[in-house]
Image (cartoon, rainbow, N blue to C red):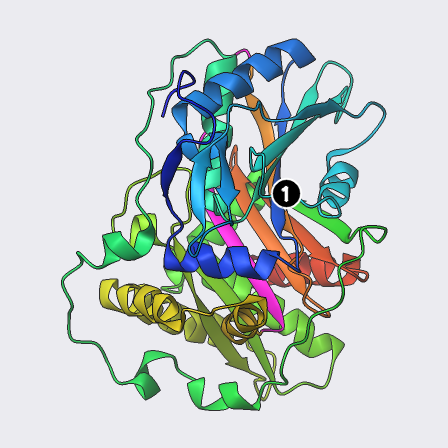
Amino acid sequence: MNATAASGHELRPLGAFERIIDLYIHRNPVQFSLAVECLCVLREREVDEALRRLQKAHPLLASMIDRSGSRPLFRFSNNAIPLRTASASTWHAQAAIEQTRPIPPSPGPLARAVLVPDAPSPGRTTIVLTFSHQIADGRGALGAAHDLLAILDGHDISTREVPICQEDLMQLVEPEPIPSVQDEVPGSEHMVQTAPASLRPFDETAPPVVGHAELDEVSVDRIRRSARLHSCTVQSMLCAAAATSLFEASNRDRVRINVPIDLRGAAGLEDDVVIRFTATSVVLSRPSRTAFWELAHAATTQLATARTLEATRRSVLALAALNPVDSGGAEQAMLAATNADIEITNLGVSSDIGTHASAQAIWGPVMSTKVENELILGVVTHGDRLRMTMTSQGSVSGLLSGMVAQLTAATS
């Protein structure tokens, strides 16, 4: 859809998972933010024009949601992505504020941006991009950030078609034999013992706490080498570090970790600004002794099974079959799917782009789902530095420092 189209023109109906998220958002606003630290001074007019061009390339960034009929629709919105400037501030302060400001479904668009001049230092600029969760997931948002940097660097970005919902794409995936449910997720027999999650009322006066930590190039190289040496993954090491830190801080016997799975890699789906994910639970039991690699191996096994083509296909179609009819049903479905002690969203490796607007760091995603006592860890590796962002309603510094200490000790 191009900028000459009439505002309000139908793009497509929301897919099943998009509709669940939209129903959930009726009473629990959910948007998430990425922060891009640029190695240059950027002016508001320059970024505003780049955002306009970004909308032309990605149709859902120029959309609104029409809830007036029996089935919600994405419609074209001719409005620009709102951009405000926040001087003398920081990306994490602005990302926290963004979680308290709902993005209305209409008149669109379902994204916005904040320009933070002289951040993190004079001669630099940080852009905080915020997306309503109906139109994007973390990896899609990272792709949008890359395209924005490319536009700012003077490159042309090709215009995409309106992306198809993920259920329709996954219907085309040929089924394969999979292990039994008991074997699919080791430790799944303990899941029913997890205390049920509950929602807290949305409060726009109470921004979440946003903590952050960074591992340098030497540390990241050690993590990667250690992962290969122990036949593990960086993601499983993050799970082990989080579990060990939570074990040390409490008397719990198990830690349940919600891990979103990007379908672009797992099922070979198209790379676009749209929802392309499912999720799995990694359940780790308290070891009899300090055993980081024991936990990492257990997480690796569980994640490998959950990322198979058929497992992701079945998960997507199972979510689609829930078909809640109201916000209450959507809340129950989301709480059941995401109930965990911590969520770890690892966006993987982000490659640098361009020269003029080259990014020195990317942080996020920062997100609050309005679940009581939530802990959401966002991870991005950019410029061979791994950056972690923790969002919660309480203090997170101890958990983040604990994870850094666990990763450092395991790779020394």
Question: Is 105 displayed left or right of 16 in the figure?
Answer: right
Residue 324 rendering spot, x and y as whole percentages? 46, 70
Residue 11 visible (yes or no): yes
Residue 51 rendering spot, x and y as whole percentages? 54, 21
Q: Is residue 265 above or below residue 126?
A: below
Task: Tell me the kind of residue under disc 1.
Answer: Pro
Kindly identify the residue that appears in the image at 53 percent across and 16 percent down.
Answer: 50
**Residue topped by disc 1:** 104
Specify the quadrant of the image occupied by residue 28. Answer: bottom right
Magenta residues?
340-356
Query: Which quadrant would the N terminus be assigned to in this image?
Result: top left
Residue 9 rendering spot, x and y as whole percentages? 40, 31
Query: Which quadrant would the C terminus be assigned to in this image?
Result: bottom right
Kindly identify the residue that appears in the image at 36 percent across and 64 percent down.
Answer: 231
Kindly identify the residue that appears in the image at 50 percent across and 85 percent down.
Answer: 191
Residue 354 visible (yes or no): no
Specify the quadrant of the image occupied by residue 120. Answer: top right
Residue 378 rendering spot, x and y as whole percentages? 59, 51
